[in-house]
Image (spheres, coloured by chain):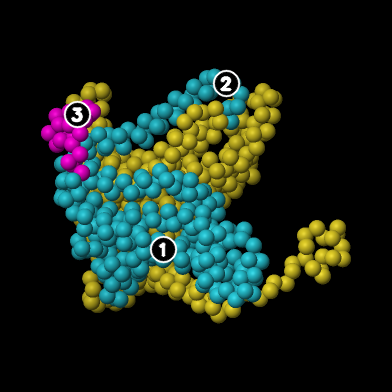
Chain colours: A yellow, B cyan
């Protein structure tokens, strides 16, 4: 009151009024405490402890002893373990992440631009349908795709046999060459709607006047997309790219539920899970190794973390550069 | 885009939309159709439309997959973890948005860090194991509950639209902090609560990784775990598997039909933070 009475014209924003004291700080803090404790114990602490456990040979069997073993886990990962397996796993992780990121975002952007067209009848329905697999979750989505790819009654099998006229169509999900692309396709199918919704939110912020002006000046859809739409939604492109990279590098839910990491589908994220908690596919070649080696799994997960960090930083730099070039 | 009357472009848009509708609806339709067939009918004519309408598959799947036992667990987990996560996040986000406590800015950054931290799967497992909470409902729920960074971000933004004068009026009138939160802030922040609540519900209901890690006895299984095990056991009986799949997906689809707007709002908020 006293502050802005003097010269309201000079400072259009009123000077910050001193707030009346409201609730006692200790009460407010006491109410925050459960959340802070839970976050510290179940989020911050485990996150940092991963690095510590990676220098031990701790196992997942209750009550068993463990000891410090220095860099042995990392040495095993990078040197002792069959180098071909390691290369295969890292390569597969790269392929998985790259193809999911590129294809998912390209399709999501295409569909978002199309569904943003006001003339299109049924676009709200289409948006709802494309987004639906996001909420269905890995257990349901994996079961759907297991049925679709099943042999010999699944629609894909029948399509290859009857329409494409193949003599002996492969059983996709138990094939060393086709299972991996199938899992990638399922991952894209599930998450395309998520990226699309983020693109749509960005597209809706673009003023229709800009498009109108461009069309009056004789631009076609193609030019409008590259010169107006894309530069204006570049922040959404960046966000979606990063989300897809981080998500696909770490996620293994669909791999776990569809193939359990067998048939050359295991990525680094899946390897961490399989090494730590058992199951097939812990080695890249699809062979079974004894699970519950959690110290080693912690080392694998540190490698994954560093990988995610490096890729994120590099791709962010690239996105910045591309933004500047536009 | 496409506001001018460019007919080929419009046709292109329609074609693409319909192709993608097919890609997204066909699998669901095929599963639904399969779930209504008899096993024999499915093996003989897998792609034909169902003529038998065997709704009995659902009852059989329900019994064989033991969903009756698991659905109670899933409801319990989903309800407890969602309410707890929302409450914890809200009680964190409100003071931060008002700067009622020292180091609010630092705390805000700390919670946002949760988005980028490595998952800590293995130490969490070790901790739960050593606390004697492995394969217990409590242990699982403790892991699945969490102060979600997205919720903190979303709520903090939302609370800024609730005028601070309301806090002051309430406290002058002698309203306690918790009472104020429950009787004023929660009702006012309802849309934000619903958005984040639905995302959290979907996440807990769908969880398959944590339930595989932490729950080994069938008495503790959630329904998605039940579906996963059932699919493995009856991998050749696709009519039952398809029926089981729809039983698990039904609550999700119903939630989605009624709450689509809130869910999409929540996702957009999550995406725009970056």
Is B50 or B186 nearer to us in this picture?
Answer: B186
- Residue drawn where x is 31% and y is 46% of the image: B250
Quarter of the image for residue A162 reads: top left
Residue A34: horizontal and vertical position, in percent? 45, 74
Report the chain holding disc 3: B
Q: Is residue B232 left or right of residue B130?
A: left
| Mark closer to the chain start, 2 or 3 | 2
| Residue B43 is covered by the magenta coloring | yes
* C-alpha distance separating marks 2 and 1: 50 Å
Q: What stretch is highlighted in magenta?
A: B37-58
| Residues tagged by mark 1 and mark 3 found on one chain of the structure | yes
Inspect this view and state whether residue A146 appears: yes
Quadrant assignment for the N terminus of chain B: top right
Inspect this view and state whether residue A301 appears: no
Q: In this view, does B44 lie above or below B8?
A: below
The residue identified by callout 1 is: B83
* C-alpha distance separating marks 2 and 3: 44 Å
* C-alpha distance separating marks 1 and 3: 44 Å
Report the chain holding disc 1: B
Graded by Cα atoms within 10 Å as few (under 14), some (14 to 19) or many (20 or more), the crowding at tag 2 reads few
């Amino acid at each position: 009151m006293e502050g802005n009475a003097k010269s309201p014209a000079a400072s259009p924003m009123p000077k910050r009024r001193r707030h009346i004291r409201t609730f006692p700080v200790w009460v407010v803090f006491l109410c925050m405490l459960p959340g802070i404790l839970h976050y510290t114990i179940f989020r911050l602490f485990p996150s940092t402890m991963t690095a510590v456990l990676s220098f031990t040979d701790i196992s997942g069997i209750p009550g068993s002893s463990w000891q410090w073993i220095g860099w042995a886990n990392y040495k095993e990962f990078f040197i002792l373990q069959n180098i071909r397996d390691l290369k295969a796993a890292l390569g597969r992780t790269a392929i998985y992440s790259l193809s999911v990121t590129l294809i998912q975002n390209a399709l999501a952007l295409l569909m978002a631009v199309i569904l943003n067209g006001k003339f299109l009848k049924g676009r709200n329905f289409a948006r709802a349908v494309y987004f639906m697999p996001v909420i269905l979750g890995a257990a349901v989505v994996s079961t759907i795709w297991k049925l679709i790819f099943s042999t010999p009654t699944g629609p894909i099998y029948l399509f290859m046999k009857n329409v494409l006229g193949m003599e002996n169509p492969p059983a996709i999900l138990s094939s060393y060459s086709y299972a991996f692309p199938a899992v990638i396709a399922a991952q894209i199918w599930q998450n395309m709607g998520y990226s699309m919704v983020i693109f749509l939110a960005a597209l809706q912020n673009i003023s229709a006047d800009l498009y109108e002006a461009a069309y009056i000046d004789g631009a076609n859809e193609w030019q409008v997309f590259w010169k107006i739409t894309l530069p204006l939604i570049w922040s959404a492109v960046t966000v979606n790219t990063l989300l897809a990279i981080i998500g696909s590098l770490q996620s293994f839910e669909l791999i776990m539920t569809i193939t359990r990491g067998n048939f050359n589908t295991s990525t680094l994220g899946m390897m961490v899970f399989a090494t730590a908690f058992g199951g097939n596919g812990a080695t890249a070649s699809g062979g079974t190794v004894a699970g519950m080696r959690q110290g080693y799994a912690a080392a694998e997960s540190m490698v994954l973390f560093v990988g995610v960090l490096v890729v994120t930083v590099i791709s962010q730099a690239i996105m910045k550069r591309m933004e500047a070039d536009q | 885009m496409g506001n001018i009357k460019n007919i080929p472009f419009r046709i292109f848009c329609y074609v693409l939309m319909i192709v993608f509708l097919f890609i997204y609806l066909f699998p669901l339709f095929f599963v639904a159709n399969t779930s209504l067939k008899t096993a024999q009918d499915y093996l003989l004519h897998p792609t034909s439309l169902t003529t038998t309408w065997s709704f009995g598959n659902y009852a059989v799947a329900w019994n064989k997959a033991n969903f009756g036992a698991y659905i109670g667990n899933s409801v319990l987990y989903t309800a407890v973890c969602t309410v707890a996560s929302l409450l914890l996040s809200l009680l964190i986000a409100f003071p931060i948005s008002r700067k009622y406590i020292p180091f609010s800015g630092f705390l805000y950054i700390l919670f946002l860090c949760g988005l980028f931290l490595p998952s800590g799967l293995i130490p969490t497992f070790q901790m739960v194991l050593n606390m004697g909470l492995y394969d217990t409902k409590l242990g699982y729920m403790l892991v699945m509950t969490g102060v979600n960074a997205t919720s903190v971000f979303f709520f903090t933004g939302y609370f800024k639209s609730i005028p601070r004068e309301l806090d002051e009026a309430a406290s002058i009138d002698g309203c306690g902090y918790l009472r104020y939160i429950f009787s004023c802030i929660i009702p006012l922040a309802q849309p934000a609560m619903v958005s984040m609540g639905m995302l959290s519900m979907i996440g807990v209901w769908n969880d398959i990784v944590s339930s595989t890690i932490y729950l080994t006895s069938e008495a503790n299984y959630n329904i998605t775990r039940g579906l996963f095990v059932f699919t493995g056991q009856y991998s050749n009986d696709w009519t039952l598997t398809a029926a089981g799949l729809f039983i698990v997906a039904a609550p999700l689809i119903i939630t989605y039909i009624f709450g689509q707007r809130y869910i999409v709002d929540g996702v957009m908020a999550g995406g725009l933070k970056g």
